[in-house]
Image (spheres, rainbow, N blue to C red):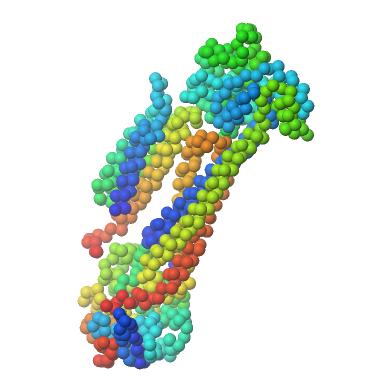
C-alpha cells in the first residue's frame, strides 16, 4: 500500500515536470528567436515522461530489488528535473521573466520533492528485501 | 538501552502512532519559518531602500509625484519633463546642500526583456544617488556611451543592450536593492541625449518639441526631476515648504516614500505574526489530542513495560521523549518545505507584494530555522506531559486480563 | 523463602451480579520447585496469578513474598518488589513492536539495575535451546505466535528472577518446544528459583513438583 502511494506520487510529479512548463507554469513564449527556457521545457518533457513510465513500472512490479533500482532511477530523474532549468540548460537571464520567477522555482520544488519521495521508496524497498525471510512468511 | 534509544528506534520503524502529530508539527514549523523569512525579507528590503534613497527630496513636475514613487518601488517606467532652468533656483534655496538632475525615459522594447524598462539619466558631475551603489565585481572602464544596469537586468551575450535600435555597452551592474531600481538602466546625460534623439525618431517624445533645434542638447532644457540633499541642521519639511512656495513643481519627500513602504510591511508582518500565533495554539491543542489518542492505542505496550518493572515516571519519560522527537522531526520537515517555497519563489513573491524584498543572509536564516524548530518542540512539551500521564496510569494487569475468557 | 498465599478471595461484578473469581485459595510457591495450577479456561487461574504477583488486590487474604506482606505496603513499593523478584511470562503476545528481538530480550534488564544484561555463553545457550538464534535481528511483526512466546520466555529468563510466573507458556508451542521450555524451567528450579506455571496442558502439569487444580475459583492440591 505504502509502495503504491509513493509510486503514484512520482507519476504525478513526472506529469507536472513534463507538461507544467508548457501549461501551468509556462516558459516565455517563443518568437522567431527560441530562448533557453524553450529548450528547458522540451527537456523537462523528456525527463518527465521518463519519470511517469518509471512510476508506472514501480506501480506494477512487486519484486523488491527491481523496485529499488527503479527508485534509484527516479532519484536520478529528479536530479535532472532540478538541474535542467538551473545548470544544464537554464532559463532567461532577466529575473523579470516568467520562466525565472515561476517556471524555474516550480521545477526546483517538483524535482526536490520527487527526489525525496523516490528516496523514501528506495529505503522502503531495500528494507523489505532484507527483512524478507527465506521460506514461508508466517501470518 | 536508554529511553531515547527506544524512542528513536520506534520512531524510525514507524511504530509510535505519531504520523498525524508529526504532520501538525510540520504545519506549525512551516508557518513559523516561511512567515519569518517573509517578514525578514521585507524588513531588509525596506532598510535597504532607506539607504538607497540617497536624496531627501525629489522635485518632479506637478502631478507626477505618484509616478516617481512607482519608479523607486516597482520600476514602473515613467516619462515626464520639467525645465532645467529650475536647477539654479533650487541650489539657491536656503538649506539645500546638493542638487542633481535626472532624466526618465521609458524604452520601447529592450532586447533583454519582454517589458519596457526605465532608463534613468544622471549627471555624472553632480550625481550623489546612483554612482555610490555600483557593484565592485562588475566594473569596466568608464567608456563613453556605456550603461550601468540594475541588478535584475540581463545583458546580451556580448555585454550590450539595445535601445531604439542602437547598441550600448554595459559598464557596471548595481547591487541588488530589492526595489524597482533593480529593473532600471542608468546612463549619463551624454548617452541620454542619444537615446532621446533615437526615441524621437521612433515617435517617442521627450520635452517640448517646438523649441529644440537639432544641435541643442535636450537635457540642457529639460530633465525629468531634481534630486536634492538637505544641509545638516535643516529639516526636509522646511526646505519642502520653501520649494512649494517658490517653485512651480511637485515635491516628494523620501521619508514619505519610506513610510508608505513601512506601513505596507507593518500590515503584512502583523498578519504573519497573528497567523503564527493562531497556528501555534491550534496545533498545540490538536497535537495534545493526537498524542493522547496514540497513547491510548498502545495501552498493551505500557502494560508490558509495567510488567517488566517500569515505573510510572519511566513511561512518562518515554512518551515525553517520543512526543518531542516527533515534533522535532515534523519541525525539520516543515522548515524544509518552507524553504522550498520561500527561497525558489522569492522573485515571484517580491513581484506580487510590490514591496522591497531582500533575502536575509545565512545567519538570519539559521536563526529562523532554530526559531521554528524550537517553537514547534516547545509546543509539544505540554501535550507530551499530558499523554505521558495518561500512559503512566496504565495498570499492568490490563495485559493479563485478556487471558481470561 | 517462598511466596505464601492465604485465604485469597477475589470478587468481580459482572453485569450487576457478583461473581467470585477466587474462592478462599491458599497455597505456596516454594523456591526450588515447579508449581502447576491447572483447570479449565475461566476457572480463575490467571486472576490468581495476578494476585500473587501483586497486580490485583484481593478482597480478603494475604500474599507474602519472602516474608513481606505485599498488600500491606504502598502500591509503588509493591511494584518495585514484584519487579525485582518476579519475572512474568504473560499468556498473550507481549513483545514491543519496532524493536528487534535482541532488543526485546535485553529490554527486561534495563529495569533491573543490579542485574545487568550479559550476552554471555549462558545467554547464547538458552537462545539456541529455544531455537530463536536466527530471529535476533528480526522484528516481532515477522514472527509466528510460537516464536514470540519463546522470545518472551527468553526475555524473562535473562532477568535472573527469584520467581518465575508463566501463564500458559506452552500455549502456541509444539511438543518438542514445550519439552524444551519445561526443561529450562526445571533448570531454573534446580538453581533455587520458584516457578509457578498456569496451564491446561497435561504434559506441563505432569512435569511439575506440586500440582493444584482450580475449579470455579476453588483450589485443590493434587500432588
Residue sitting at 26 percent across and 81 percent down? C42
Q: In terms of image quadrants, where is residue C53?
A: bottom left
Q: Quadrant of the C terminus of chain A?
A: bottom left
Please state which of residues C56 and C67 is positioned toward the viewer in this rendering: C56
Residue under the image location 55 percent in, 27 percent down: B76
Number of disc labels: 0
Q: Is residue B232 above or below residue B111?
A: below
Q: Is residue A82 left or right of residue B169?
A: left
Q: Seen from this angle, which residue lies furthest top?
A: B214
Question: To which quarter of the image does residue C65 belong?
Answer: bottom left
Q: Is residue A126 above or below residue B405?
A: above
Residue closer to the observer: B229 or A79: B229
Looking at the image, is A9 positioned above or below residue B114? below
Q: What residue is drawn where x is 33% and y is 77%?
A: B400
**Residue A108 visible:** yes
Q: What residue is rendered at 38% in x and 28% in y?
A: A39
Could you tell me if residue B187 is visible in this image? no
- Please state if B393 lies on the left or on the right of B79 as rendered: left
Return the residue nearer the eye: C135 or C8: C8
User: Residue C141, how many percent across, how many down?
Assistant: 31, 63
Amino acid at each position: 500500500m505504502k509502495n503504491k502511494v509513493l509510486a503514484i506520487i512520482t507519476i504525478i510529479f513526472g506529469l507536472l515536470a513534463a507538461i507544467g512548463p508548457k501549461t501551468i507554469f509556462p516558459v516565455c513564449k517563443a518568437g522567431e528567436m527560441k530562448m533557453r527556457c524553450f529548450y528547458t521545457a522540451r527537456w523537462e518533457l523528456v525527463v518527465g515522461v521518463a519519470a511517469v513510465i518509471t512510476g508506472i513500472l514501480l506501480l506494477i512490479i512487486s519484486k523488491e530489488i527491481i523496485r529499488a533500482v527503479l527508485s534509484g532511477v527516479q532519484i536520478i530523474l529528479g536530479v535532472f528535473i532540478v538541474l535542467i532549468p538551473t545548470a544544464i540548460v537554464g532559463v532567461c537571464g532577466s529575473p523579470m521573466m516568467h520562466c525565472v520567477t515561476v517556471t524555474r522555482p516550480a521545477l526546483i520544488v517538483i524535482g526536490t520533492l520527487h527526489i525525496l519521495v523516490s528516496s523514501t521508496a528506495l529505503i522502503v524497498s531495500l528494507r523489505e528485501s532484507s527483512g524478507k525471510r527465506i521460506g514461508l512468511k508466517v501470518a | 538501552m536508554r529511553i531515547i534509544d527506544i524512542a528513536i528506534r520506534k520512531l524510525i520503524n514507524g511504530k509510535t502512532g505519531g504520523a498525524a502529530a508529526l504532520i501538525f508539527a510540520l504545519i506549525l514549523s512551516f508557518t513559523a519559518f516561511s512567515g519569518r523569512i517573509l517578514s525578514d525579507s521585507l524588513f531588509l528590503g525596506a532598510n535597504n531602500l532607506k539607504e538607497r534613497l540617497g536624496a531627501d527630496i525629489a522635485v518632479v513636475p506637478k502631478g507626477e509625484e505618484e509616478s516617481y514613487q512607482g519608479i523607486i518601488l516597482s520600476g514602473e517606467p515613467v516619462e515626464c519633463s520639467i525645465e532645467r532652468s529650475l536647477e539654479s533656483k533650487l541650489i539657491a534655496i536656503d538649506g539645500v546642500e546638493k542638487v542633481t538632475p535626472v532624466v526618465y525615459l521609458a524604452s520601447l522594447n529592450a532586447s533583454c526583456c519582454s517589458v519596457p524598462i526605465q532608463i534613468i539619466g544622471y549627471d555624472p558631475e553632480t550625481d550623489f544617488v546612483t554612482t555610490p551603489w555600483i557593484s565592485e565585481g562588475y566594473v569596466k572602464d568608464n567608456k563613453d556611451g556605456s550603461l550601468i544596469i540594475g541588478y535584475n537586468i540581463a545583458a546580451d551575450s556580448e555585454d550590450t543592450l539595445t535601445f531604439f535600435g542602437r547598441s550600448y555597452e554595459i559598464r557596471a551592474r548595481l547591487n541588488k536593492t530589492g526595489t524597482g531600481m533593480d529593473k532600471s538602466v542608468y546612463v549619463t546625460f551624454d548617452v541620454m541625449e542619444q537615446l532621446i534623439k533615437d526615441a524621437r525618431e521612433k515617435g517617442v517624445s521627450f520635452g517640448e518639441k517646438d523649441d529644440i533645434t537639432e544641435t541643442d542638447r535636450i537635457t540642457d532644457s529639460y530633465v525629468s526631476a531634481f534630486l536634492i540633499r538637505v544641509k545638516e541642521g535643516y529639516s526636509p519639511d522646511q526646505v519642502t515648504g520653501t520649494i512649494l512656495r517658490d517653485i512651480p513643481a511637485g515635491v516628494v519627500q523620501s521619508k514619505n516614500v519610506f513610510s508608505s513602504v513601512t506601513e505596507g510591511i507593518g500590515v503584512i508582518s502583523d498578519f504573519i505574526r497573528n497567523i503564527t500565533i493562531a497556528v501555534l495554539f491550534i496545533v498545540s491543542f490538536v497535537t495534545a489530542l493526537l498524542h493522547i489518542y496514540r497513547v491510548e492505542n498502545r495501552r498493551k505496550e505500557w502494560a508490558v513495560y509495567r510488567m517488566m518493572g517500569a515505573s510510572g515516571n519511566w513511561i512518562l519519560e518515554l512518551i515525553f521523549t517520543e512526543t518531542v522527537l516527533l515534533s522535532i522531526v515534523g519541525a525539520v520537515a516543515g522548515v524544509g518545505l518552507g524553504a522550498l517555497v520561500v527561497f525558489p519563489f522569492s522573485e515571484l513573491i517580491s513581484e506580487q507584494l510590490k514591496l522591497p524584498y531582500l533575502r536575509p543572509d545565512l545567519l538570519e536564516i539559521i536563526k529562523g530555522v532554530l526559531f521554528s524548530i524550537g517553537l514547534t518542540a516547545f509546543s509539544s512539551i505540554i501535550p507530551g506531559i499530558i499523554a505521558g500521564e495518561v500512559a503512566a496510569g496504565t495498570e499492568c494487569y490490563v495485559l493479563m486480563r485478556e487471558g481470561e475468557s | 523463602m517462598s511466596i505464601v498465599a492465604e485465604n485469597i478471595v477475589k470478587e468481580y461484578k459482572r453485569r450487576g451480579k457478583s461473581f467470585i473469581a477466587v474462592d478462599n485459595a491458599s497455597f505456596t510457591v516454594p523456591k526450588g520447585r515447579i508449581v502447576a495450577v491447572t483447570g479449565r479456561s475461566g476457572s480463575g487461574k490467571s486472576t490468581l496469578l495476578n494476585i500473587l504477583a501483586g497486580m490485583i488486590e484481593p478482597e480478603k487474604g494475604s500474599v507474602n513474598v519472602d516474608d513481606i506482606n505485599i498488600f500491606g505496603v504502598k502500591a509503588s513499593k509493591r511494584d518495585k518488589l514484584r519487579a525485582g523478584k518476579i519475572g512474568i511470562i504473560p499468556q498473550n503476545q507481549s513483545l514491543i513492536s519496532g524493536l528487534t528481538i535482541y532488543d526485546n530480550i535485553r529490554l527486561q534488564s534495563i529495569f533491573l539495575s543490579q542485574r545487568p544484561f550479559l550476552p554471555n555463553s549462558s545467554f547464547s545457550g538458552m537462545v539456541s535451546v529455544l531455537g530463536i538464534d536466527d530471529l535476533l535481528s528480526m522484528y516481532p511483526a515477522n514472527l509466528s505466535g510460537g516464536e514470540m512466546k519463546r522470545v518472551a520466555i527468553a526475555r524473562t529468563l535473562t532477568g535472573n528472577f527469584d520467581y518465575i510466573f508463566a501463564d500458559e507458556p506452552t500455549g502456541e508451542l509444539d511438543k518438542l518446544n514445550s519439552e524444551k521450555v519445561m526443561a529450562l524451567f526445571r533448570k531454573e528450579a534446580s538453581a533455587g528459583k520458584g516457578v509457578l506455571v498456569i496451564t491446561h496442558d497435561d504434559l506441563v502439569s505432569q512435569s511439575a513438583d506440586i500440582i493444584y487444580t482450580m475449579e470455579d475459583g476453588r483450589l485443590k492440591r493434587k500432588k
